[in-house]
Amino acid sequence: MVFQMSNQTKLIIFVTFIMMVVVYNIGMTEPGIQKDIKVVAETDETENVVSDVAVRIRIIPNSNKYEDQQAKKMVKYAIDEFLTENAENLTDLVSTREFIAQEVTNLENRVDHVLSSIQYKEGFNITYGAHLFPEKVLDGVVYEEGYYESLVITLGEGGGSNWWCFMNPGLCLGPSMSESESDDDGWNGQYTAMESAQES
């Protein structure tokens, strides 16, 4: 005997499927890290990603208000420490990509712990892929505007002056928080590649 579904049964199955899709999408937009590690670009021209020697890392604060900039600094300290602990895994582009894929949850936990410890109320989001960078100059070298492979940590609305550097070959490795406490601007010294306003 051939079983035939009634229109009512078909409708119930269809509505159930739609609800499952909606619930899944809501779960994927919760504050925190985007669990799927994939290319994230501001246009569809991801094939135009600029070739680079290293994966960039960038921290964009909520705004330029004092508390938001301090939160950015605290996250930067934590990132410095995290990368220093794992320096042996950041020797080249391939190993850095593997490190990001394996340690992304630990990175999220580190950022979450730091922001919770200072009772920072804004959420955060972490994306990995092709992100647009304006032209930047580092040690006399001009890096043209374009899409670069990068790990971006955005705090709140991401409207403040950002910090960035290279994850490898160890250019981000800097002093731990305890070594920098006596100099609040120490984080912005030799270990900082660039401090600039976020491009519009």
Image (cartoon, rainbow, N blue to C red):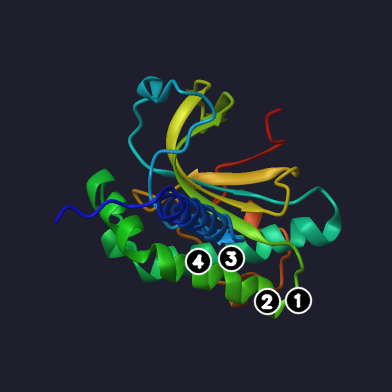
Query: How far apart are the two marked residues, 4 and 3, measured between alpha carbons?
Result: 14 Å
The residue singled out by tag 1 in the image is: 119
Mark 2, other Cα within 10 Å: few <14 / some 14–19 / many ≥20:
few
Q: Earlier in the sequence, mark 4 or mark 1?
A: 4
Point out the image quarter for the C terminus: top right
Secondary element type, mark 1: loop
* Secondary structure category for the residue under label 4: helix
Q: Is residue 177 visible?
A: no
Q: Is residue 111 above or below residue 94?
A: below
Q: Which residue is mark 2?
A: 116
**Residue visible at 73% across and 76% down in the picture:** 118
The residue that disc 4 covers is 108
Q: Quadrant of residue 156?
A: bottom right
Give the residue type that dot 3 points to.
Tyr
**Residue on which the image places disc 3:** 77
Left or right of 30: which side holds 57?
A: left
Whether pointer 2 and pointer 1 mark residues with C-beta atoms closer than 8 Å, the reply is yes
Residue at image point 50% right, 61% down: 174
Circle nearer the N terminus (2, 4): 4
- Asked if labels 2 and 3 touch by Cβ distance under 8 angstroms, the answer is no
